[in-house]
Amino acid sequence: MTISQTRNIGLPLMNLLKLKGFSILLQLQLEEQLLRTSSENWCILNDGTSDPTVVMGVSGKPAELLEIESVVLDQVPVIRRFTGGGTVLVDDGTIFVTFICSKDAIPGLQPYPRPIMSWSSLLYNKVFQGIGDFHLRENDYVFGERKFGGNAQSIIRSRWIHHTSFLWDYKVGNMSYLKLPKRAPEYRLSRGHLDFICRMKDYMTRSNFIERTVEATGFYFSVRSVDLEAIETPSNIKFCPSSRLLAKQELEAAARAL
């Protein structure tokens, strides 16, 4: 038993799944599976995803959010995920962190969006302690006035999920696939993408961020590492993921409707 394990005796169990370069579509489908079919707590850390991909919230409208002609021409995959939130371009410079918890996992935490968001900021305050001017701004994680982490949530009867895309790095050209959203946080002040976001790599290494995130999770949970191969859907539960790739025809139809 490690010192960390000894410290965490009596805390709720958290299964930690660490991935690297895992498909964001498969990750989202796995997250929904664990949200809906598991009764355990999960933390998923995925260090980058293989191909540049646009990920939209469940109610996102491609015509309002994307430069569709460029997306179609360059064959950029577009995913509609099962949670709410905004639109993001993810690639190998994105680090994904997801928490999937039962409603009673964290004592005193009310299972509503704002309390869950506030709890997450406490956890990440530990991660970024002494690094940059970190704080929660509306629903974003920022250093100063610049965003580096976008969040989305889903809350069901007995469980909730909070997942974050962290911009450790980004390619300037990829930002051109995204339109300025009609609904944006007030602190954005109509800034373009490149004036609004920043890179985490200017503040810390990837490995340091991941290590600190696991350590901070250990303040709230007893963390146990698990392998992807060990995750199974119970045989008595039918599950069909709702996160999916949008077909080229759907995007072209959205473009024609402009």
Image (cartoon, rainbow, N blue to C red):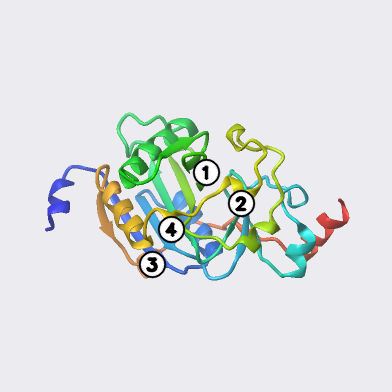
Mark identifier at residue 183: none
Give the SS element for disc 1. Answer: strand
| Residue 186 seen anywhere in this rendered image of the structure | yes
Residues at marks 1 and 2 touching, judged by CB atoms closer than 8 Å: no
Q: Tag on residue 201?
A: 4
Q: Amino acid at mark 1?
A: Arg
Pointer 3: what residue?
A: 228
Q: Callout 1: few (<14), some (14-19), or many (20+) C-alpha neighbours within 10 Å?
A: many
Give the Cα separation between the discs numbered 3 and 2. 35 Å
Q: Amino acid at mark 4?
A: Lys
Q: Nearer the viewer, residue 62 or 149?
A: 149
Answer yes or no: do the residues labelled 1 and 3 have beta carbons within 8 Å? Answer: no
Identity of the amino acid at label 3?
Answer: Leu
Tell me if mark 3 has few (under 14), some (14-19) or many (20+) residues whose alpha carbon lies within 10 angstroms of its own.
few
Q: CA distance from mark 1 to mark 3?
A: 34 Å
Q: Is residue 62 left or right of residue 44?
A: right
How far, Cα to Cα, is label 2 from label 4? 15 Å
Q: Secondary structure at mark 3?
A: helix
Q: Residues within 10 Å of mark 2 (few under 14, many from 20)?
A: few
Q: Earlier in the sequence, mark 2 or mark 4?
A: 2
Q: Residue at x 76, y 63 (%)?
A: 70
- Relative placement, left or right, of 17 versus 12 is right
Q: Are marks 4 and 1 in contact (CB under 8 Å)?
A: no
> Which residue is label 2 attached to?
194
The answer to the question of whether label 4 and label 3 lie on touching residues, with beta carbons closer than 8 A, is no
The numbered mark, 4 or 1, whose residue comes first in the sequence reads: 1
Residue 145 versus residue 118: which sits nearer the camera? 145
The quadrant of the picture occupied by the N terminus is bottom left
Task: Give SS at disc 4.
Answer: helix
Q: Residue at x 30, y 52 (%)?
A: 212
- Coordinates of residue 174 in the picture (x, y in percent): 64, 62
